[in-house]
Image (cartoon, coloured by chain):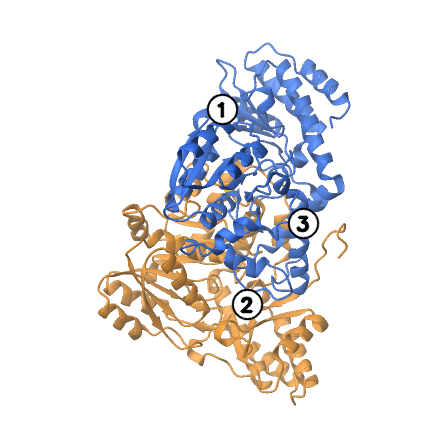
Chain colours: A blue, B orange
Amino acid sequence: MNSRKAFLPPRRILMGPGPSDVATRVLEAMARPTIGHLDPDFIFLMDHIKAQLQYAFRTANPLTMPVSGPGTAGMESCIANLVEPGDVIVVCQNGVFGGRLKAMAVRCGATVVHVEDEWGRAVSPSGLESALRSNPAASVVAFVQAETSTGALSDAAALAKVAERYECLTIVDAVTSLGGSPLEVDAWGLDAVYSGTQKCLSCAPGLSPITMSDRAMARVAHRRTPVQSWFMDVNLVTGYWGSGTQRSYHHTAPINALYGLNEALLMLQEEGLLAAWARHKQNHLALKAGLEVLGLEFVAPRSERLPQLNAVRVPDEINEARVRQRLLEEYSLEIGAGLGALAGKVWRIGLMGYSSRRENIMACLSALGQVLTYEGLCVSATEAQAEADRALRQPTLP
Amino acid sequence: MNSRKAFLPPRRILMGPGPSDVATRVLEAMARPTIGHLDPDFIFLMDHIKAQLQYAFRTANPLTMPVSGPGTAGMESCIANLVEPGDVIVVCQNGVFGGRLKAMAVRCGATVVHVEDEWGRAVSPSGLESALRSNPAASVVAFVQAETSTGALSDAAALAKVAERYECLTIVDAVTSLGGSPLEVDAWGLDAVYSGTQKCLSCAPGLSPITMSDRAMARVAHRRTPVQSWFMDVNLVTGYWGSGTQRSYHHTAPINALYGLNEALLMLQEEGLLAAWARHKQNHLALKAGLEVLGLEFVAPRSERLPQLNAVRVPDEINEARVRQRLLEEYSLEIGAGLGALAGKVWRIGLMGYSSRRENIMACLSALGQVLTYEGLCVSATEAQAEADRALRQPTLP
C-alpha cells in the first residue's frame, strides 16, 4: 500500500466469528452526510434506533440503546453499572467470553464465584444452582448465551429462572445471538443484555446494543458507590439517549455508524425477526450437512449448537493455519481460528446475518473441500454441496 | 420519518463544536466493503493509521493509535491507565472538559487538586505551579489544551514544563486542536494526549486518537493495581494495536470507521500539517473580522483564542436558541450553543478541518447577519463578508 494512496480493501466472503458480510445498502447508509449529534433529525434517528432495538431484543425496556463502542464496551458497561466493590457475582464460564466477564467483575471490585463448564458445552443450570445455594450473598449472575469461542448455545431462559429464584440479577452476553437465534429479553426476565453489531445484525463493528430491565436500573440508582467508569455510567448516558427532545450532552455519538445500524435494523424488520431466526437455523443445518460430508466434527453436541457459529475440529495432521490462509488468499474467504483453549484445534465458521446465505454455504463447502483435498484429505466438495442443497430443500423449520 | 424507510439525513453546513463537515471522499471510504479485523490487509491498515497519527501528533511514541470509542473514551483511557487509587492528580479547569477530567480522576480513586481558571481564559502556568508547590505528592497534571466549551487555547508547552519540574506526567486534552493548531507532543514533552476524529480531522465521530510517551507506558507497567477498566487497559490494547503481524484479539476494531480515519489522515498529509494549521489560523481571522462587523464579541482574549472554535457572546435581548434554530431550519447551518456556565450566553462557531473553508465563512456571515437583522439588530451581512474577504486576501501567516 502506497502511503499516499487510498485504502481499497479486498472483497471478502466473511464467514468467521464476525464481522459478517455487510449488505451494500448498509455500507451506503454509512456514507450519507454527517449531521450534528444534537440535530433534531439525529435525535429522531436515535429514537427510531431505540425502538428497532427493542424489537430485536423483544423487550419494552426504556433503556435499550447502542453503546458507542464495540461489544467489549457493552460487556463492561453492564458489569460496571451493576457490580460494585464487595458485591458477590456468580460468573459462568464455558469459553473465552465468560473469562472476560470474570476479569471485568474482578476489576470492579467484586468477589467472583466462578462456575466452570466444559468448553464447547452449554452452561449447566444445575451447576449455577449449586453455586447460588452455597453463596447466598450473590446478587448478580453473568453468563454467555452464545459462546462465540466454541459455538455453544446455553439455555438463557433456564439460567435466568435459577438466578431469579435466588434473587439475582442476570447479565447476559448475546453478542452472537441477537438477530440470529431466539432471544426473549422480557419473556425470559433477563436484566442486562449486551450484543454487537458485526454479528447477526451485519453492520460494521463498533457499536454494542444493550438493554437493561427496570430492576437493573433500580439497582444502578441505589448503588452505594458511583459507577467507576464515567464514560459507561448509564445514569449519565440516559440523559443523552433518553427520551424527549431535551438531550444532555454526554459524548458525541458515532453518527455514521448509527446510520448503518439503522439500515441493518430496517433489514431485520423487513425480513421479520422470527424469519431471520428460521433462516439462520436452516442455513446452519445445510452447512452442517456439508461439513459432515467433508468429515468435520462439531465441537458442541447437537442440542447445544449455535446455528450462526459452527465450530468444528481440525482433522489430525492438517495444518489449520495454512488452510485458513489458503482460503483467504485463493478464495477470498475468511473463516475463524480457535480462541483460548481451542486455539489451533478448531475452525469457527460463521453464518451470521447477511453472511447466512445459500451462496456463502456453497462457496465455503466448495473452497474448503478443495483445500482439504490439496492438503491430502480424501473428500468431495461436490458431494458436500449436494448434501447441503438437499438440506436447504427441506421445509423451513418452525 | 416512516419507520420502514431509510434515514436520509439533510445536508448541513457543520459549524458547531463538532462534528465538522466530512469530505465526500472520507464518507465514501467508510462505505467500502468490511473485511475481518485480523485480515492481513487490515493489520496493514492499522500500521498505516498509526504512522499517520504519529505524523499528526508530531511524535515517535510507539503507543499512538485510535481508541475504539469517542473522545470521552480516549479521555478516560488516559486517566484510567495513569491514575490509581491514592494518587494525587492536579486537574486544571477552565471550562467544561477540565471538570470532566476531574470527575473521571475521582472515579479512579485519585485525590484531585483542583486548579480553577476563569472560563474563557487560558490555564495559568503560575496557578499550576503554586498548586504543585503545595502538593508535593502529585504525580500527574491534567489540562485541556483547546477548551471546546469556551474557545480558549492554553499554552501546553509552558504547562508541561511546569509539570516536568515537579516530576509529574501530563495528560492533555487535544480533542479540538489535533490537525487544527500547533500540537507538538514530543517537542513539548507531553505524556498522554487524546483527541477526537470529528473536529479538525473531519471524520465521522466515534474514534479517539491517543498517544502515550514511554514514560507514561513505564508508569502503566509499574502500577500497584490493575487498570480498573478492562476495555481501556493499554497493556491489553497494545497486544491488538501493537507491532508485528501477530496481534492478540482484544476487541473488534470499528473497521469502516477506520477506513474513514485513514482517508482523512491522508488528506491531512496531502495538505501538510503546517499548512493545515495556517489555514485554520487565516480562516479564523477572516471569520473574526466578519463577526466583529456584526457586533459580536469573543469570549477569550485575542492571545488566548482557539482559531478553530470561535465562542462569541450573544447580544443582549437576542433569543440565542431561536437564532440557532433559524440558522438550522432556514439555512441548514449548524452552530453550537454554550455549555455549562456559558449555556445560553454564547454561540460556538466552529471552523474545523474540512469545515474551515472560505465558502463556509461566507455562508455563516451571510446567514447570521440576515437572521440577526430579522431579530432586530441593525447589522450588515454584506459588510461582514467584505471584511472577511479582505482578511482572506492578506498574505498567509507563517
Q: Give the farthest residue toward the top.
A: A378
Provide the secondary structure element on which disc 2 rests: loop
Q: Nearer the viewer, residue A324 or A175?
A: A175
**Mark 1 secondary-structure assignment:** helix
Badges 1 and 2, same chain: no
Kind of element beneath mark 3: helix
Q: Amino acid at mark 2?
A: Pro
Q: Is residue B63 in view?
A: yes
Give the numbered dot on residue A321. 1
| In-image side of B310 versus A284 (left or right) | left
Q: Residue at x 65, y 38 (%)?
A: A179
The image shows residue A397 at horizontal and vertical percentages of: 73, 26
Q: Position of residue B254 (x, y in %)?
A: 54, 46
Residue sitting nearer the eye, B69 or A208 = A208
Quadrant in the picture for residue B324: bottom right
The mark total stands at 3
Q: Earlier in the sequence, mark 1 or mark 3?
A: 3
Mark 2 lies on residue: B17
| Residue B68 percent across, percent down from the top left | 50, 49
In the shown orientation, is residue B348 left or right of residue A136? right
> Which is more foreground, mark 1 or mark 2?
2
**Nearer the camera: disc 1 or disc 3:** 3
Q: Quadrant of residue B378?
A: bottom right
Q: In the displayed orientation, state which residue is furthest to the bottom.
A: B378
The N terminus of chain B lies in quadrant: bottom right
In this figure, which residue is indicated by the disc labeled 3? A262
Q: B138 or A328, which is in the foreground?
A: B138
- Amino acid type of the residue tagged 1 in the rendering: Ala
